[in-house]
Amino acid sequence: MRTPTNHQQSGFTLLEILIVMAVLGVLAGVAVPNLLSSRLAANEAAVIATMRAISTAQFQFHSAGELDVNGDSGFEFGTFGELAALDELRGSSIRLTRNLLSAGVAEVDVLGWATHHGFHFCLYLPAASGVGVAGMVGNYGVIDPVQAHRYWTCVAWPVTAGNTGRRAFFVNQQGQVLQQMNTSYSGSAIIPPAGAGLVGVAESNINTQQLAVDTLGSDGQYWIPVH
């Protein structure tokens, strides 16, 4: 007499698979936004540190009297390349003997933009009219030594707003970093002007000491200090 054989089936039922997929979907819905938020926070923290490093480098460059193009003892502020000893100083064939800013921060493209931490950075120096021009070798002849003795600005904005950062940042010769929350500035499509975080001048001008602290800047956006 033959004994019946029990065949045990292994694997997941359709219902079990659907339950697992639903659970994974819920977990992904929680984890992905948290991951994105953490990445944005890390990017922006690095950008704030970079803006402060740029401010410190400019202060050291200026106070050490590294550059005096017109020989009036009114020492001038520098470009990214000058601060990092990547480029020759304006009006000379020498470079700094030490870099005040790291090369990774200071290397710029043809527009004069440095890009890292998911942000673009542009450092501006003034022309004779006070209009900010990107600080790079190609603009050496436009930068005014009298104005550059007193003024500079730097703006930072996300490569992709909402994806690499939510804020834009601004700093100038006064050293206080400002931020603009939930920025619309993004990549090469919407670019902050040179005087974005200033008041009392046109948005393209940087020849003023008046910061837009807790108020609208020359770009029409609201700027607040970074603490």
Image (tube, grey):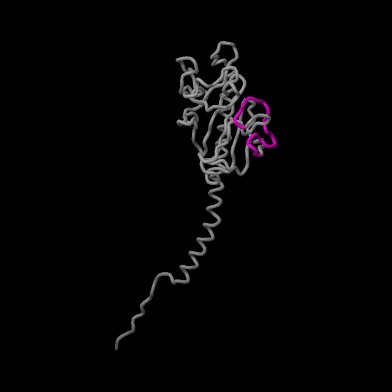
Total numbered labels: 0
Residue 171 image point, x, y percent: 61, 30
Q: Residue furthest bottom?
A: 1
Q: Quadrant of the C terminus?
A: top right
Q: Tell me which secondary structure the magenta stretch mostly adopts.
A: loop
Relative vertical location of residue 25 with respect to residue 226 in this rendering, above or below: below
Q: Residue furthest right?
A: 214
Q: Residue at x 51, y 64 (%)?
A: 22
- Nearer the observer, 84 or 167: 167
Q: Residue at x 52, y 41 (%)?
A: 189
Residue 209 image point, x, y percent: 67, 25
Asked whether residue 218 is drawn in magenta, I would say: yes
Residue 155, by quadrant, is top right
Residue 72 image point, x, y percent: 59, 11
**Residue numbers of the magenta segment:** 203-221
Q: Residue at x 60, y 20 (%)?
A: 147
Residue 53 image point, x, y percent: 56, 29
Relative vertical location of residue 166 with respect to residue 152 in this rendering, above or below: below
- 188 left or right, relative to 203: left
- Nearer the observer, 103 or 186: 186
Relative vertical location of residue 95 with respect to residue 162 in this rendering, above or below: above
Q: Residue furthest left?
A: 1
- 11 left or right, relative to 124: left
Asked whether residue 8 is drawn in magenta, I would say: no
Q: Quadrant of the N terminus?
A: bottom left
